[in-house]
């Protein structure tokens, strides 16, 4: 279930699209999408969370939380993750994971 959570700031109202998970917790929809994208790209490259975390100098528990949409990240952290995955940030956002998976399957079958 998706709901809009309103948090009052000092000068403005922030609206975050949240999704309620089966365990009753709520997560930001954008953070979940970011985490899913990182996870899929990491798995395509046959990297474990620990491998990628070590490669980019990040704690593996933090990377795990990022992939599960539990924490927000800075632009610098996203840049580091993209570098570890062999992508630019622009490629990361434009990357269609399903297209790449189909391309890999075609390459393996030939």
Image (cartoon, rainbow, N blue to C red):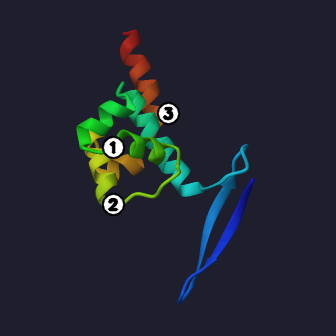
Residue under the point 29% across and 58% down: 76
The residue that disc 1 covers is 59
- The mark closer to the camera, 1 or 3, is 1
Determine the CA span between mark 1 and mark 3: 28 Å
Q: Residue furthest top?
A: 110
Q: Position of residue 6 (x, y in %)?
A: 66, 74
Q: Nearer the viewer, residue 10 or 92?
A: 10
User: Element type at marker 2?
Assistant: helix
The residue that disc 2 covers is 75
Q: Any mark on residue 98, and which?
A: 3
- Residue 95 visible in the displayed image: no
- The mark closer to the camera, 2 or 1, is 1
Residue under the point 36% across and 10% down: 110
Circle 2 residues within 10 Å: few <14, some 14–19, many ≥20: few
Q: Earlier in the sequence, mark 2 or mark 1?
A: 1
Q: Position of residue 74 (x, y in %)?
A: 36, 61
Determine the CA span between mark 3 and mark 2: 25 Å
Determine the CA span between mark 2 and mark 1: 17 Å
Residue under the point 45% across and 27% down: 101
């Amino acid at each position: 279930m998706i709901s809009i959570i309103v948090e009052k700031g000092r000068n403005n109202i922030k609206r975050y699209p949240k999704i309620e998970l089966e365990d009753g917790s709520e997560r930001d929809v954008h953070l979940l999408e970011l985490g899913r994208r990182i996870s899929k790209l990491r798995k395509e490259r046959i990297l474990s969370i620990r491998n990628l975390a070590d490669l980019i100098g990040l704690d593996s528990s933090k990377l795990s939380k990022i992939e599960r949409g539990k924490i927000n990240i800075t632009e610098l952290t996203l840049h580091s993750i993209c570098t570890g995955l062999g992508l630019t940030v622009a490629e990361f956002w434009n990357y269609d994971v399903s297209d790449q998976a189909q391309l890999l399957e075609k390459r393996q079958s030939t």
